[in-house]
Amino acid sequence: MIDTLHDVETPEGVSLQLRAAGPVVRALAWAIDAGIRLGAVWFGATLLALLGTAGQGLIFIGMFAVYWLYPIAFEALADGRTIGKRVVGLKVVHASGAPVGWMPAIIRNLLRVVDMFPMLYGFGLASMLLDDRFRRLGDIVAGTLVIHDRPPRLRGGEIHAAPLAPPVLMQPEEQAALQAFAERSRWLTEDRQAELADLLDGLTHARGPAGVEQLHRHASWIMGRR
Amino acid sequence: MKQEQFVERHAGEWQAFEHYLEVLRKGRKATAGERDAVFAAAEFPARYRRLCQQLALARLRGYSPALAQRLQDAVHEGHDRLYRVRRIEWRQALAWLAGGFPLLVRTHARFMISSAILLFAPMVTMIVALDANPALAYSVYEPSDIATYEEMYDPARHDAGEGRDAQSDLAMFGFYILNNVSIGFRTFASGLLAGIGTILVLLLNGVMIGTVAGHLTATGSGVPFWTFVAGHSAPELLAIVIAGGAGLQLGYAMLAPGRVPRIVALRRAGRDGAMLAMGVAAMLVFAAFVEAYWSSIFWLPPAVKYSVGVALWVLMLTWLLAGGRERAA
């Protein structure tokens, strides 16, 4: 697989495209979470130290909760996102694309112990690099996947050219490419538009801005304007 | 149908759906006006299915990628809303602890027995060996650690009536939860490495507990030690055995998946193991409670403490061996 898109078929029969998240961005999310957890423990400890020895017990319980319960609770209750993952834009889902439930969240977080072995996620990293969906061992056993929550939005601009039928019959992929070119022209410089349009000078029999204009008109026709 | 007509025909539906999703996202912050403006929740599944169909058409007919992306985003969010996570029913969870958990433990009986052997054999061996040769303890522990233990269970302190105060009880409660439940989870999880981690943890714990027990008994601190551990020994040792069994069955699924693909066996074992780990955590929290608040009570006669200890063993074993039987039938 060249790209990181993973197709899952929903019960309704459409494919959802999930973009698997790689080790670097997952490490970043983990680092943010680690910072938050350490901060919480430090802050809680400072407060509870005021309560003396009894406070110490609460600190221990707090440390336990922050270490084990934080990831499980956030993944199961907050749509598969811990705070670090939310900041970076990641999400834990079932391999089927459905939101992650309690059992998978528990499994993948308990098995984090193995992933952290031998030193700072050694096994986990190896697993992520060998798997085509960047899954660590906990993900594989739990049947979960970490995906980018909001894939980069394809920006669609308005096309304002008068429709003109293309001289040849075009394949669907070719039509889609023309449409994409026309919609994204807004974010391309004029030189770049001309450069791309020149690739099709056999179709348009024109170069430069004239070629661009003609391609826009073809795209407008393809989309159905008459 | 061309894209223009397609968009014209369905744009209203898509906007209504997107508004509905937005109101859901806002949750409580949505105003009553916003909530009234969207369709009823009962219509949601049908509208979602229509949207899925339209997405499939958009892809099939090669409409612009931007349009497909917009529909896909709406479908994705609708999918997440429709297939939500079930809430935990606490009553169900407690009922499971009473019946389902012991049943699960018995399902993996051979792993539990192996785990028990791996834990108790070295323990008993060390106790017996140290009875003959108390100095053996220094092969296992640092002299400073042994001195700490001897001081903790010093019979002179015990008779003088020094115990813990209420504040330290809470401190120890918290500490035992943090320490023991973490050990339980690690014992289970390290089973993924073909069970090696679990085996090592069990052997190590057996040796270390046995050494402490044996050394203290042999050097005259027996009564303070055994009266201390009697109470919480049942839940704690049984929990470690079960955590070990959970880890062993996970490692076994990795090594010998049987007639199913390895990944399927691993997933089942992971699920079973995680459920066992939850039960183990409950047992260890209970053990921590007993250890923090009961075990250090020094002013009761040893006979009382021993009988409570025995009673807890009987109770726990009955629960594990007989719990959930009506379900199995």
Image (tube, coloured by chain):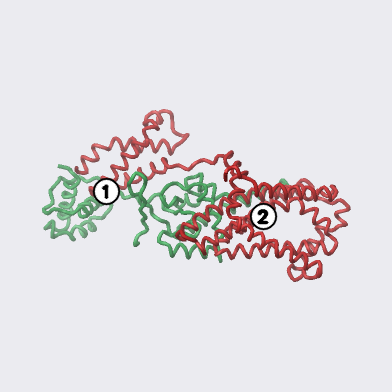
Chain colours: A green, B red
- Report the residue at 22% width, 50% height from top: A179
When asked about the image quadrant of residue A119, the answer is bottom right
Q: Residues within 10 Å of mark 2 (few under 14, many from 20)?
A: some
- Report the residue at 77% width, 70% height from top: B138
Where is B249 relative to B141, above or below? Answer: above
Q: Where is residue A60 drawn, in percent x and y?
A: 67, 51
Which amino acid, mark 2? Asn
Residue behind mark 2: B180
- Output the chain of dot 1: B
User: Secondary structure beneath disc 2?
Assistant: helix
For residue B18, side relative to residue B105 (left or right): left
Residues A199 and B247: in front is: B247
Residues B307 and B75: in front is: B307
Q: Where is residue B134 drawn, in percent x and y?
A: 81, 68
Residues A78 and B190: in front is: B190
Which mark identifies residue B59? 1
For residue B174, side relative to residue B274 (left or right): right
Which amino acid, mark 1? Arg
Does the image show residue B210?
yes
Q: Quadrant of the N terminus of chain A?
A: bottom left
Q: Residues within 10 Å of mark 1 (few under 14, many from 20)?
A: some
- Report the residue at 79% width, 62% height from top: B148
Where is B187 relative to B275, above or below? Answer: below
Q: Earlier in the sequence, mark 2 or mark 1?
A: 1
- Output the chain of dot 2: B
Label 2 and label 1: CA atoms lie apart by: 54 Å
Q: Where is residue A40 drawn, in percent x and y?
A: 60, 50
Q: Residue furthest front?
A: B329
